[in-house]
Amino acid sequence: MNTVHRPRRLAAAVLAAALAGTGLTLAVAPAAHAAASDVVAKLPISTYSALAVDNVHQRVFVADANVGSTSTYGLVAVYTFTGERVSTINFSYHVSGLAVSADGSTLYVGERYRIYAYDAETLALKSVASVQADQCGREVVVAGGKPYHTAQWTDYASQCGTATTQLDTLVGGAWQRTGWNDAGKLLLEGGPNDTFVMGQALNAAAPNPFVSVFDGAGDTPVRTATRRFADDTGAGALDLKDIAVSPDGAKIALADAAAGTRLLNTSDLSDAATGYRPLPEGATASSVAFSGDGKYLARGAAATGTTPDLLVQPADPGDSTAPLEFVFEGSQDGDRVVPRGMEWAADGSRLFAVTTNATGNQFWLHVIQPPAVQYDVRFTGGLTHSPAQAVAGEPLAVRGKLEWDGPAPGDPLKVRATRTDADGTHDLGTFTVKDDGSYTVLDEPDLVGDATYSVSYLGDLTHRPADGPSTTVTVGKAPSSITLNAPAEASQATGVQITGTFTAQGKALPERATLKVQRTDRLGSGVLTSVTVAADGTFTINDLPRSRRDVTYTVSWPGDDLHLASTASATVFVTR
């Protein structure tokens, strides 16, 4: 057995639903902290063409294409659902298409000149049908109880990108041409109720590729819907890498290297009312697969560095649950998910994904199974905050504590926090829980009045979500202050000069403050010309006093919606 057991590299979030048939419950998390079960088998192939799953006998089949030369030999490697290789089927020529019958009894293999049928359980050869020769690599799909397959012949392998591909079938074991054909590679994907989808790869002879839905129940397929995607200017053309049909047949997902993941209505191939969110920046769509229970969608990609290569998320695009993310890096994992490289177990308990290295000459089979056990998480005590008097625009720390059952997480847990004030509810993001269970939510409230802080734990692969406590904080205005530097004595002849500094804590003022200046002497009080504070907070007051003896200067600022008023006074003894 050529397998390596290892933890998942990166899991940024998890799914909030039960995996059908397994009793697994995956809860949302902004960052995952426990390893998913990820068995990795190094595949004995140097090229890749197809992946098929037999859910009845729990077998996974991977085909080695080896197209391009009559001297190459193809093979199909057979694995268990646990990643153990149990057999290899060898062929004299390249193999490039795999499909398993609906009842799991038959494995169909597309070879250069033939379609082979094997007993899916014993791997005994059941029949061989001669078909039209294929130079470039077949696609095989089962619909209406019979295998449909493509055939593309050229004089030179370099012409495969644009050569005409025919759609053929076997009726009663005899080869039959359907008459459907087009330029370049044609991808086939099976659906329920004897339907299948055919999609055209982007190529020089087909600048606006199509996707079509067929009813394959009869002796010849009938097209029910078709679509091309480019607009009148040629923009938006499909760059198709993979096709997936939802188990109920209502939706089709496309891995489009140009547009990401497209979601279509099967009936007319129109865009679904709600689509999937974009893939992470730097990730190019390469593969897509619905789980057999219809609850999940896996999106494979080609990405570098820490950008995820695989996302597993709810199939419902309206579900905002963050996806489970995987990063594949280097010689133990491969670097990206290959096109047409993913299939699910029918019950959704396992995802099978084929990855390759940057040069595309080594391949790995990943058997991904989330952990089966989840533990409880509890918030203990209430929330406290500091400083005791919160002010608008100043840092505020809200603290609490979390406890969890089960093993310690591999990475720190995180809590999510919100603030609700007069402007609504604001997501403050996630905050790390320390080893002792304590956490601190940091915020800068920007409104005066009551602000309610709430925390929750959204769950991870091994811990259930939990609602946390709330606390209401009264947010006051931030203080402001004025300081004056005045002479003790001055004369009417030379005048009075006072310098000062104005500061306002909290949120920065939208413009420089203007200060009111009032002079009080033995003749009464009067308002002098206001002064505007400089960018560094300083200001200067110049005055020619009108009387002798004590003269008091009062400088004030009225405050604003977020800042308290402030005032300061200085008395100068004035001589003649």
Image (tube, grey):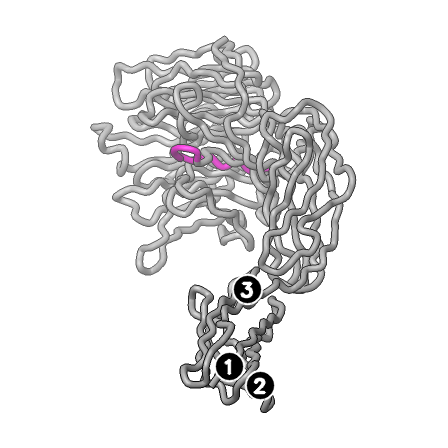
CA separation in Å, label 2 and label 1: 10 Å
Residue farthest to the bottom, as pictured: 523
- Residue placed most toward the observer, 574 or 89: 574
Q: Main secondary structure of the magenta part?
A: strand
* Dot in front, 3 or 2: 2
- Residue 461 place in picture, x, y as percent: 63, 30
Residue 576 located left or right of residue 121: left
Residue that numbered label 1 is attached to:
574
Structural crowding at the residue carrying mark 1, measured as other residues with C-alpha within 10 Å and reported as few (<14), some (14–19) or many (≥20):
many
Above or below for 314 versus 564: above
Q: Amino acid at mark 2?
A: Asp
**Badge number at residue 521:** 2
At 64% from the left and 42% from the top, the residue drawn is: 440
Contact? badges 2 and 1 (CB < 8 Å): yes
User: Is residue 54 placed above or below 501 in the rendered structure?
Assistant: above
Q: Which residues are magenta?
A: 296-306
Q: Residue visible at 47% across and 28% down?
A: 147
Disc 1, SS:
strand
Q: Tell me if mark 2 has few (under 14), some (14-19) or many (20+) residues whose alpha carbon lies within 10 angstroms of its own.
A: some
Mark 3, other Cα within 10 Å: few <14 / some 14–19 / many ≥20:
many
Q: Note whether residue 214 is visible.
A: yes
